[in-house]
Image (cartoon, rainbow, N blue to C red):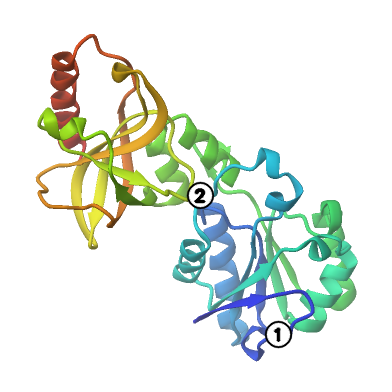
Amino acid sequence: MAIFTYALGAAIPDALRGGVLTIGNFDGVHLGHQALLAEACGQAKTLQCSAIACTFDPSPAQLLRPDRLQPPLTTLADRAALLQHHGADHVMVLQTSSDFLQLTARDFFERIVVQHLRTRAMVEGFNFGFGRNREGTIEVLRRFCDEKKVPLTLIPPREVLSQPVSSSRVRSELLAGNVDVVAELLGRSYRITGIVGVGQRRGATIGFPTANLHDVPTLLAGNGVYAVRAFVNDKAWPAAANVGPNPTFGEAVRKVEVHIIGYSGDLYDQSVAVEFVKKIRDTRPFASVSELTAQIRNDIAAACKVL
């Protein structure tokens, strides 16, 4: 297994040639993406070749619509690892540039899919689009594949709770705090990773020290208190996390504060990962520190019960 980065016009490694190809942003690597990978992997075994997952960095939206861009669901490194975990033999990372985004659908298909990769078969989803202005619809792709005699398999949408699974739906459910639904869409709990930094130290003064996660590169869940699992040096700990401001103390800045149940030790400057399991309650102000302390005690008990 390997990860290859490709810039427009560069040479293609031999390992990427002659495989079964699936292309997409693959942000989140949700159940729909996993279905594409499973099909590509199955076809690759039949053809005795490699299953190739092709993704983009940065996301085309980062260049085309930077004002509307949300943080990703996965970092590039995590996305590549998940793609390989779910069946890709190799991951090809297309470096997105303004020149790359000007490729027509025909140019993209003939230059990259046919000439460079010498693709033996393609597997794509119901909403796949490619080329300048996404002019390459599924119908266009089908026509191009027929012309070049590249077998094309289209995978219907996967449905969870009677709705199609998509990266946009994962984001919507995550921002709504429905992390249990997100876990169903992903096939795993949603995870963020950050570096523990210095906070206001209020938690320690009231008996509930928290790790304040800074520099989280991925999308945060909606404001609220959650039952989570915290990972310190790859060991999982039960925890309760607050995402959002602290209105009791008049703070409006969104933060991630994690109380790791049963843990003692210095975590400053360490990397800590958090998996969201279930939302416990919404964020709200409290009339006094004692009232807040009582609620935190209840939150921790609720998190323990969930976990």
Query: How many labels, in total?
Result: 2
- Within 10 Å of disc 2 (Cα), the crowding (few <14, some 14-19, many 20+) is many
Which numbered disc flags the more N-terminal residue, 2 or 1? 1
**Dot label at residue 260:** none
Q: Position of residue 170 (x, y in %)?
A: 52, 41
Left or right of 93? Residue 301 is left
How far apart in space, not on screen, are marks 2 and 1 (Cα)? 28 Å
Instruction: Say if 167 sits above or below 114 in the image.
Output: above
- To which quarter of the image does residue 25 belong? bottom right
Q: Taking the image as drawn, is residue 166 in sight? A: no
Q: Residue at x 73, y 55 (%)?
A: 128
Q: Position of residue 204 (x, y in %)?
A: 14, 35
Q: Residue at x 57, y 48 (%)?
A: 158
Inspect the image, locate mark 2, and give the three-letter code of the amino acid beneath it. Answer: Leu
Inspect the image, locate mark 1, and give the three-letter code of the amino acid beneath it. Answer: Ile
Instruction: Say if 68 sits above or below 40 in the image.
Output: above
Left or right of 19? Residue 88 is left
